[in-house]
Amino acid sequence: MTLDHPIFAKWPAAHPDRLQLFGAPTPNGVKVSIMLEECGLPYEAHRVDIMANESHDPAFLALNPNGKIPAIYDPDGPGGKPLALFESGAILIYLADKTGQFLPADPGERYQAIQWLMWQMGGAGPIFGQLGFFHKFAGKDYEDKRPRDRYAAESARLLDVLDGRLDGRTWIMGADYGIADISLLGWIRNLIGFYDAAEIVGFDRFKHVQAWLDRGLARPAVQRGLVVAAT
């Protein structure tokens, strides 16, 4: 079996019958590797070195014209036809539908789960990322601390929203772990770890989020997914 897509000129598939993942162990990247580990789907991971600008290589841009990881190529997509897909949230929904796992079948609950996924995509992810820039990376050298403080305050507000949602719940949707949880685990882990922002957002206040994060990180599939494409 051969895979007919320009991406494979740079990242050849050793197992062309498997779903192909192109990513890196970033908060967005690990969403998909965790999901794949949780689902148990056979897949092959390819590391895209974003520090070397590989996500803007023409081969990668042929898969994702937006030039961001992660992206997938499924040789056995809908109707048995290959499917190339980017945007981590879209990939999570696709994998949930493909496997019948981690997304409620009930239409009302399904849309509520997708609602929380969109909350991560449009709110928590971008805001936490901006805080990381202004708190730890190049932005920390700016004399004007108003941008950092703005993103710290909004990060704390979002954590408070999540903390309220988790009050009395094991997972975001209640008793069942799903794609909303998977989408957030890497981001919150990064916020208090790699970004070193626990103190500036007052993370100790959010007891329900802390307990949820501990439960999520204790899952073996999550631990495996966090290190996929690390080398």
Image (cartoon, rainbow, N blue to C red):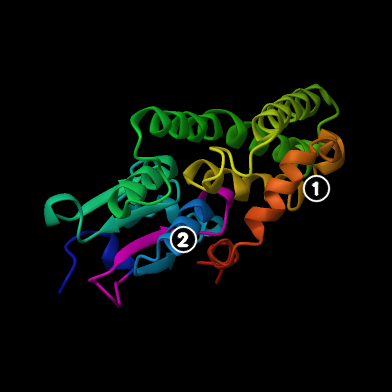
Residue 24 is one of the magenta-drawn residues: yes
Q: Which mark is residue 177?
A: none
Task: Indicate the quadrant where residue 45 lies.
Answer: bottom left
Choose mark 1 or mark 2, whichever is in front: 2
State the residue at coordinates (68%, 26%): 161
Q: Earlier in the sequence, mark 1 or mark 2?
A: 2
Q: Which mark is residue 196?
A: 1
Q: Residue furthest bottom?
A: 14
Residue 207 is one of the magenta-drawn residues: no
Please state the extent of the stretch shown in magenta in the rendering: 12-28
The kind of residue on which mark 2 rests is Glu
- Residue 229 in the image, given as x and y percentages of width and height: 50, 67
Left or right of 28? Residue 57 is left
State the residue at coordinates (87%, 40%): 199
Q: Where is 27 relative to 42, above or below?
A: above
- Residue 216 in the image, given as x and y percentages of width and height: 63, 54
According to the image, label 2 marks what residue?
A: 38
The reply to whether residue 51 is visible in this rendering is yes
State the residue at coordinates (33%, 42%): 65
Q: Residues within 10 Å of mark 2 (few under 14, many from 20)?
A: some
State the residue at coordinates (32%, 51%): 100
- Residue 169 in the image, given as x and y percentages of width and height: 64, 38
Task: Quarter of the image for the C terminus: give it.
Answer: bottom right
